[in-house]
Image (cartoon, rainbow, N blue to C red):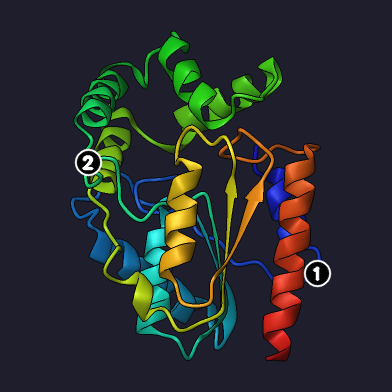
Amino acid sequence: MWRHWMRELSRRNRLVRYDERCNGLSQRHVVDISFETMLSDLECVVEAAGLDRFTLLGLSQSCAVSIAYAIRHPERVSGMILYGGYVKGWRARGDAGEIATREAAATLMRENWGKPNPMFRQAFCSMFIPGATHEHFAWMDDLMLRTVSPDDAWRLQNSFSVIDVSDLLEKVSVPTLVLHARDDNVAPVESGRTMAAGIPGARFIELESQNHILLEGEPAFEEFIDHVRAFIAETARA
């Protein structure tokens, strides 16, 4: 699911990535999964990797963390790229219908995520990659089972729901590129537009895709990579 991202993002530059707490190879069942702690984790990774000045890439919920980091450490961020993000989480947006739907999904997540029957996880997958093949769904299902526990998945969804960086956008002072898939079901494209409109001087690019995770071979992924490389080259010269 992510191999083509890792390959292309590291083809012409060094890529540093990390597993968010409670995900992947990071410690599971950690008590504190607050926004401030997620920000602190990013700061620790930057220090541990010995990064001085770099392009910061945020995907999905990590866009908000990236925004907070760029405000706190503008001297280190040569440019910021945000893809598929949102200014406010689903609970913070305050839509009663969306909240009811998401809460029901969160309950199903806690009860069904780790069970052998993949039905719920496949429904979850269809939100993220509706343009996927059966092989993609199988990969995604296996990835979800291996990388996060049912309880942590539920806790993380609830933590992300209250994210709200609307008051931070105007404080961003680093060059910013915002990209978003036009028919994204996880984070509506309006979220990306709002994010770009609130950040001084930010550029917004809409990609022709319905996938929250851009798939290998789709034109939108190639376009994404082209824009990322051009932005990195431009901001490196500044």
Q: Which residue is mark 1?
A: 12
105 vs 35: above or below: above
Q: Is residue 25 visible?
A: no
User: In this view of the protein, which residue sits in the foreground, 139 or 232?
Assistant: 232
Q: What's the CA distance linking mark 2 and mark 1? A: 39 Å
**Residue occupying the point 73% across, 44% down:** 220
**Residue occupying the point 41% across, 45% down:** 23
Q: Which residue is mark 2?
A: 91
How many numbered marks does the figure carry? Answer: 2
User: In this view of the protein, which residue sits in the foreground, 220 or 60?
Assistant: 220
Q: Nearer the viewer, mark 2 or mark 1?
A: 2
Quadrant where the image shows the C terminus: bottom right
**Residue occupying the point 36% across, 21% down:** 113
**Residue occupying the point 69% across, 40% down:** 208
* 197 with respect to 92 (left or right): right
Q: Amino acid at mark 2?
A: Arg
**In what element is the residue under mark 2?**
loop
* 198 with respect to 111 (left or right): right
Q: Position of residue 124 (x, y in %)?
A: 45, 23
Farthest residue, direction front: 197
Q: Report crowding for label 1: few under 14, some 14 to 19, many 20 or more residues within 10 A (C-alpha).
A: few
Q: Position of residue 140 (x, y in %)?
A: 57, 28
Q: Amino acid at mark 1?
A: Arg
User: In this view of the protein, which residue sits in the foreground, 209 or 56?
Assistant: 209
* 204 with respect to 236 (left or right): left
Quadrant where the image shows the N terminus: top right
202 vs 128: above or below: below
Give the quadrant of residue 166. Answer: bottom left
Give the quadrant of residue 7. Answer: bottom right
Which numbered marker is on residue 127? none
Q: Is residue 129 visible?
A: yes
Give the quadrant of residue 71. Answer: bottom left
